[in-house]
Image: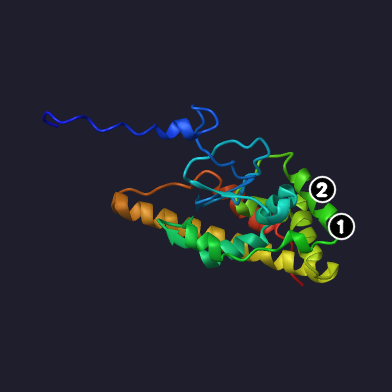
Amino acid sequence: MGGGVPAAVPPAPVLSRPAWYALRPARAGQVLWPKIQQYRHVVPWNPLGLTASCNFYDLAPRDGRDPLLLAAVLNAFPQVLAKQAAGRVRNEGVLKTEVADAARMWAVDPARFAPAGGERVRQAFLALLARAALPVPEECGREDRCELDRAVLVAAGIGEGRASELVDRLHEHLCESFLRERRLERRAVEARRGPAVRIGPSPGDEASSGAQGALVPEVG
């Protein structure tokens, strides 16, 4: 300001990028972990390298290993327990994982899979990619979902019979906990709207209830 000589203007940050219109200097994550999750467990595989918003964390396997296996492991339902343990619940069942939460979250290491086990996980995940993801209770008990979850546990060193038993118990637990959160959410919304307003069944409530009874395998 005033009569002094104006200071030199530093080069714009975009000039340091490979292309001036590039949105980010670093490579996009091969797998994207959502910061906020609720009804569905979906961890996108990103083979096209699309740029994600700040609502996703960029992930990549170490040492150039197959990102598809990492995506398969993170989309398996055993990972739901890990995210519930590491994350924090907000606003009627919304699960949020901050950077620190995601950093301390446990996950199966696909680098330890034997070739046959890794191939089974890969094929199970590719089969799951052929359809849209459903809310957790509607996923529970579906054969393609069960196969991915079993394949991950078996590849991690658990026997086939024990893995099947654990998947059955896991799906039953997740189904019950999801429906419990849905009931708590509806009560909280009704409380905010006042005693004179009552909300009818949420879309998918009937399907979720049916999924709990018909799609979750019975545990002997």
For marks 2 and 1, give the one nearer the viewer.
Answer: 1
The answer to whether residue 185 shows anywhere in this view is yes
Residue 87 shows in the view = no
The residue beneath circle 2 is: 123
Label 1 amino acid? Pro
Q: Which residue is mark 1?
A: 115
Identify the residue at the far left of this view.
2
Q: Position of residue 135 (x, y in %)?
A: 60, 49
Q: As drawn, is 198 to the left or to the right of 182?
A: left
> Which residue: 66% across, 55% down?
74
Q: Position of residue 31 (x, y in %)?
A: 63, 47
| Residue 160 image point, x, y percent | 84, 67
Query: Callout 1: few (<14), some (14-19), or many (20+) C-alpha neighbours within 10 Å?
Result: few
Can you say which quadrant of the picture contains the N terminus?
Answer: top left
- Please say if 106 is above or below 7: below
In the picture, residue 173 is in which quadrant?
Answer: bottom right
The residue under the point 72% across, 42% down is 129
Is residue 48 rendered to the left or right of residue 54?
A: right
User: Between residues 218 and 148, which one lies in front from this camera angle?
Assistant: 148
Please state which of residues 129 and 46 is positioned toward the viewer in this rendering: 46
Location of the C terminus (image quadrant): bottom right
Task: Name the foreground residue: 99 vs 220.
Answer: 99
Q: Report the side of 15 relative to 141 (left or right).
A: left
In primary-sequence order, the first of circles 2 and 1 is 1
> How many numbered dots are placed on residues in this image?
2
Q: Amino acid at mark 2?
A: Gln
